[in-house]
Amino acid sequence: MTVLERTDQPHSSPSQGANPDWTIPQGYERYGEAEHRTWTTLYERQADILPGRACDAFLHGLDALDLHGHGIPDFQQLNDKLNALTGWRVVAVPGLVPDAVFFEHLANRRFPAANFIRGARELDYLQEPDIFHDVFGHVPMLTDPVFADYMQAYGKGGLRALSLGSLANLARLYWYTVEFGLLETPRGLRIYGAGIVSSRTESIFALASGSPNRLGFDLERVMRTLYRIDDFQQVYFVIPSLQDLLDVTTGTDFGPLYAKMSRMTDIPIAAIEPGDKIFTRGTQDYARSGGRLRQGAA
Ligand code: PHE
Ligand code: FE
């Protein structure tokens, strides 16, 4: 789970029984039948709507990892496949971990994932990312070699941003790419962000709704843009390719950029700036009418 998907901070030291790096055993044998069923229900709902919406890298990853509807995946089996593909592994954590711990894992190609699953009565809205968001949402993209490198570079960049006091700017990059990113393809826009692909309602909203803006990705612009964590996004940023995202982020020294941005104002969520490449100019009707994840809001 990411440190960016919450407003509170976790405890400052690992809970009893956890390792110094905050990892815990997944506890696979402790899942009950109802929990496995919740996974399968969520899986089937997404499998139904993601073809034609999610990008190829995600859909291929889903197949390659065999995350099909057989209940919650066993991290050991999952890691055999994932590690062979890109050298990444999934490690279980109790939920929230401190920023530095999270980045340290990413920098070493370990993705921290919650080991618990949401209750059967809260399939659509989650206060805190669970194993379905973390594994179904994030892990398929880690089978893509380019995205795999991006996530590792992000982890290293996170440690650096922490030491420079610029985490707020870097967190927005994570938000608008890893969590809510869209990709331009010859067949139209596709989803690669984990926050979208793990949500039935936002998978539809992100591509079909007339409400949000969809703008071309620009590194500095994105790192200046505020975001909200409790409702559908009001703006999505579109990358031309995963390779382009990797190249522009690893090819830029963020140090001077952080210094420059610290003297600039933040950009409001729904703003359109001079120089923005506009894919869709949204009406913002959804947000203006109160939002809150209305079913069928698309
Ligand atoms: N190039 C960034 C820096 O100088 C590191 C980074 C790479 C950050 C990729 C995010 C993603 O800090
Ligand atoms: Fe996430």
Image: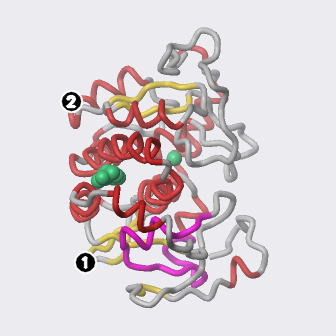
Q: Which residue matches tag 2?
A: 84
136 over 10 or under it: above or below? below
Mark 1 belongs to which amino acid? Pro
Residue plotted at (61% across, 82% down): 211
Q: CA distance from mark 2 to mark 1?
A: 30 Å
User: Residue 266 at x, y = what percent?
Assistant: 56, 71
Q: Nearer the viewer, residue 163 or 252?
A: 163
Residue plotted at (43% across, 73% down): 221
Over which residues does the magenta segment extend? 205-227
Q: Which residue matches tag 1?
A: 186
Label 2 Cα neighbours within 10 Å, binned few <14 / some 14-19 / many ≥20:
few
Residue plotted at (78% across, 74% down): 290
Residue at the right extreme? 290
Is 57 positioned to the left or the right of 134 in the image?
left
Mark 2 belongs to which amino acid? Ala
Q: How many marks?
A: 2
Whether the magenta-drawn stretch holds residue 256 is answered as no
Is 156 positioned to the left or the right of 10 in the image?
left
Whether the magenta-drawn stretch holds residue 223 is answered as yes
83 over 19 or under it: above or below? below
SS class, disc 1 = loop
For marks 2 and 1 on the same chain, the one whose residue lies earlier in the sequence: 2
